Image: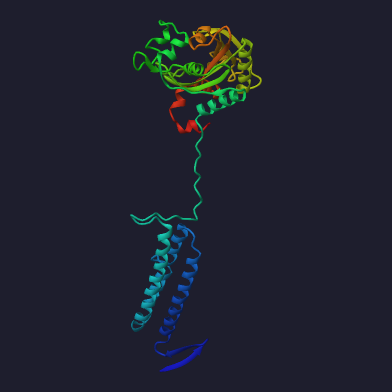
Amino acid sequence: MLHDVQQGGIFYFIDSDYCAMTIVQNTLADEIVALRRAAEKRFSELRSVDDLEKFRVEFLARKGSIGELFDKLKTVPNEQKPGLGKQLNELRSFVESLFESLQQKLNPGKKGEEAAIDLTLPGRTVPKGTLHPITQTLNDIVAIFTSMGFAIATGPEIENDYHNFEVLNFPPDHPARDMQDTFFISEKILLRTHTSPVQIRVMEHQQPPIRVIMPGRVYRNEAISARSLSQFHQVEGLYVDRNVTFSELKGTLVTFAREFYGKDIKYKFRPSFFPFTEPSLEMDITCFICSGKGCPMCKRTGWLEVLGAGMVHPNVFRNVGYNPEEVTGFAFGMGIDRTTALRHGIPDLRMLLENDVKFLEQF
C-alpha cells in the first residue's frame, strides 16, 4: 500500500513493504549530489602536485568517497540500481576529468609535449659565476698601476727571436735560448717566454715619455710542479723619460706593494741580474701567511719574492733607436699565478688550472 508524504518540500512515496529501501535510495541520491559539490569545492583549492594526489585518494581511490557510494549501491533494490548507478558513473567520470585536467598542468607533459611547470614550487637559485682568481689578481694589479698613470699595452704570444731575445740584450749563448727553457716553433719563431717583447714593440713605435704596463700569457718549457707551470701570466711595466732615477723605481714598487699587499708589510730589495736591466734587483715582502715567522710558503725565511726590476740597459735603448745619453728608464715584472697563490695561500699552482668548481667557488 502506497502513501504520499511531504517532508521538507520533497515527496516520498512510501510502500510499507519497501519503506527502508526507498529511504536508502533517496539518501544515496542526496549523497551523490553532495559529493559532487564537495569535489568541486576541493578541486578549486588544489595548488600543487601533493594537493592533487590527496584529492585522488580522497575521491577516486578504491576506499575513497566515490568507492563508498558504490558499496552502498549494493543495498538498493535491483530495479533502482540502474538509475543510481548511472549517477555514480557520471560522478566518477566528472571527478576523473577534474583530476586529469589538473594533472596535465602540474605533471610533466607527454612525450613530444612541453613539460608543464608547477608555479607553486619555490624558485631555484641560479648560481652566479665569478672571475677566476688569476683574473681577479690581474685586474687588481692593473687598477693600481693605471691609477699611477700607466697605460696598458699587449702584444703577440707567438714571437720572433729578435723581439724575445736579441733586442733585449740576450747573448747568443744565453741559457734562456736553450730548448729546455723555450718552446720553439721554428728556428726563429717561438712562444714568448716573457712579456718583455711588448716593451720593445712599444718603444719601436713611440718616443718617450713612455709609462706602460704589459699583462699577458707567457710560456716556458719547464716541468710542471707545485711551484712552476709551462704556461703562466705576467705583468711587466716600463717607464722611460729624461732623468728617470733608481729611487723612482723603488718608490713605484713600494707604492704598488703597499696598495696590493697591505699598508703594514715590510719589504727589502736584493741585487739581482737580468740581461735587459742594469742595475737589477728583486723585491721581497714579509710573508703574510706567517707574518714573517717562517712557514713552508716562504721556505722558513719569513720573506716572499714578489717581483724583479731594474734600470733599462743602455744596449736595449740603442737597439730601439733611443739615445741612452738622453733618456733613462726602469722596467719591472711579476708572475700573476705565483702572486695569486701567495695572496690566497694556495700551496700548489696547478690548482689554479684544474677548473675544480669547489675550489674556484672560494674566490
- Front residue of this view, candidates 293 and 216: 216
Residue 356, percent from left and from top: 45, 31
- Does residue 336 appear in this view? no
Residue 253 appears in which quarter of the rendering? top right
Residue at (43%, 90%) from the top-left corner?
Answer: 13
Residue at (46%, 33%) from the top-left corner?
Answer: 357
Residue 286 appears in which quarter of the rendering? top right
Figure coloring: rainbow
Residue at (49%, 47%) from the top-left corner?
Answer: 124
| Left-right relation of 4 to 85 | right
Residue 119 sits above or below residue 316 on the image: below
Quadrant of image for the N terminus:
bottom left
Residue 91, percent from left and from top: 40, 73
- Front residue of this view, candidates 97 and 147: 147
Residue 76, percent from left and from top: 38, 80
- Front residue of this view, candidates 306 and 304: 306
Residue 302 appears in which quarter of the rendering? top right
Residue 184, percent from left and from top: 36, 15
Residue 57 sits above or below residue 90 on the image: above
Q: How many marks?
A: 0
Residue 358 sits above or below residue 259 on the image: below
- Does residue 330 appear in this view? yes
- Front residue of this view, candidates 233 and 75: 233
